[in-house]
Amino acid sequence: MEWRAFGPTKREVPVIGQGTWHLEEDDRDAAIAALRLGLDLQMTHIDTAEMYGDGVVEEIVGEAITGRRDEVFLVSKVLPQNATRQGTIEACEASLERLGTDRLDGYLLHWPGEHPLQDTIEAFEALQRDGKILSWGVSNFDVSDLDAAARIAGEGRMACNQVLENVQQRAIEHAVLPWCEKHRLAVVAYSPLGSGRFPGPRTKGGRVLGEIAQAHGATPRQVALRFVVRRPSVFAIVKAGNPEHTAENAAAADLELSAAEIARIEKVFPLGRRPRTLPTL
Ligand code: NAP
């Protein structure tokens, strides 16, 4: 596993971490085994949210990390509709309870919402002062949202922006990624395998991924994951409902793509024009 400094936090985090969206729909034992195997393979960044399964996923994660809390870089998210000054504190405390822990390593606003950002940020800062969260960040923030958050919080306060990024959806590379790099935020790529819509082997892009994979004795998904984390600011969180998928995904970190291979992938999955609004899932 490769580890990198996570934005301005003083923490090293693995380049490939574990997502948990829809985990409540999987066989519970298989899902827990997958998360635990992920920890064994050093995929210690676990991403969850109060939204996932209405809290059930946080309970599953809590069970999976029992006895192993100190290994984990644990991140959860507050829903925008709960993100008032008091609501954010209460949502965090409920997440901690479901996760069976006394602290989160990261706590994020799931997407920009109706409540004043100032109130959410004040709550994050209070939670951090109290030791309930070790860092805070945002998710699905476009450049204008990031500017607004930085004006309120000041430089160096936000740890990360969690955004959609995979071979087929590279919109953040236009402006969001450069903004985060300039301001030293970690970029966390969600849906790095396209959330179940992975390019088929008979498509043009799928063939290129297949050929590069074959040259490395790897799989197309491993190539796609490694491509997503090709810049030092980027981390991926990938969801797997069974240990076989987890093992395949963890091994992506060991792959080394050449500059020519990266250029080939960029060509077959072009960046396209900058969209007016940031794509989300
Ligand atoms: P993803 O990780 O790109 O893809 C997950 C899908 O790929 C699942 O269907 C999974 O199947 C399958 N898969 C995973 N590894 C595989 C493998 N080695 N071989 C074959 N299939 C494989 O999609 P995602 O869940 O949307 O995104 C990842 C995480 O990012 C989420 O779980 C969540 O934590 C986070 N996220 C955040 C936001 C946000 O707004 N902040 C939005 C979306 C996602 P199995 O389940 O059967 O293994």
Image (spheres, rainbow, N blue to C red):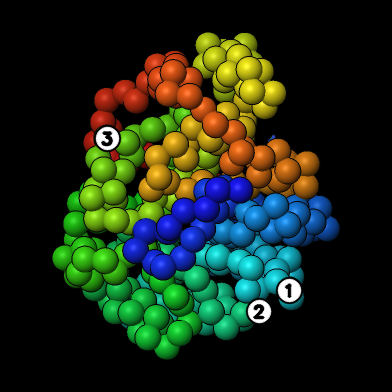
- Residue 61 in view in this figure: yes
How packed is label 1: few (under 14 Cα within 10 Å), some, or many (20 or more)? few
Going by the numbered disc 2, the residue's amino acid type is: Gly
Q: Nearer the viewer, residue 14 or 140?
A: 14
User: Quick one: which residue is furthest to the bottom in this view?
Assistant: 130
Residue underneath mark 2: 100
Q: Position of residue 251 (x, y in %)?
A: 66, 40
How packed is label 3: few (under 14 Cα within 10 Å), some, or many (20 or more)? some
Residue underneath mark 1: 66
Whether residue 110 is situated above or below residue 207 in the rendered picture = below
Whether residue 115 is situated above or below residue 7 in the rendered picture = below
Whether residue 152 is situated above or below residue 259 in the rendered picture = below
Quick one: label 3 or label 2, which is nearer the N terminus? 2
Dividing the picture into quadrants, the one containing residue 122 is bottom left
Q: Position of residue 26 (x, y in %)?
A: 75, 51
Alpha-carbon span between mark 3 and mark 2 = 39 Å
Identify which residue is drawn at 30% across, 73% down: 121
Which dot marks residue 174?
3
Identify which residue is drawn at 48% across, 20% down: 261
Quick one: label 2 or label 1, which is nearer the N terminus? 1
| View quadrant of ligand 1 | top right
Label 2's element?
loop
Whether pointer 2 and pointer 1 mark residues with C-beta atoms closer than 8 Å, the reply is yes
Identify which residue is drawn at 66% across, 18% down: 214
- Which label sits in the foreground, 2 or 1? 1
Quick one: label 1 or label 3, which is nearer the N terminus? 1
Dividing the picture into quadrants, the one containing residue 269 is top left
Label 1's element?
loop
User: Quick one: which residue is furthest to the left in this view?
Assistant: 151
Q: Nearer the viewer, residue 168 or 181?
A: 181
Going by the numbered disc 1, the residue's amino acid type is: Thr
Q: Nearer the viewer, residue 118 or 210?
A: 210
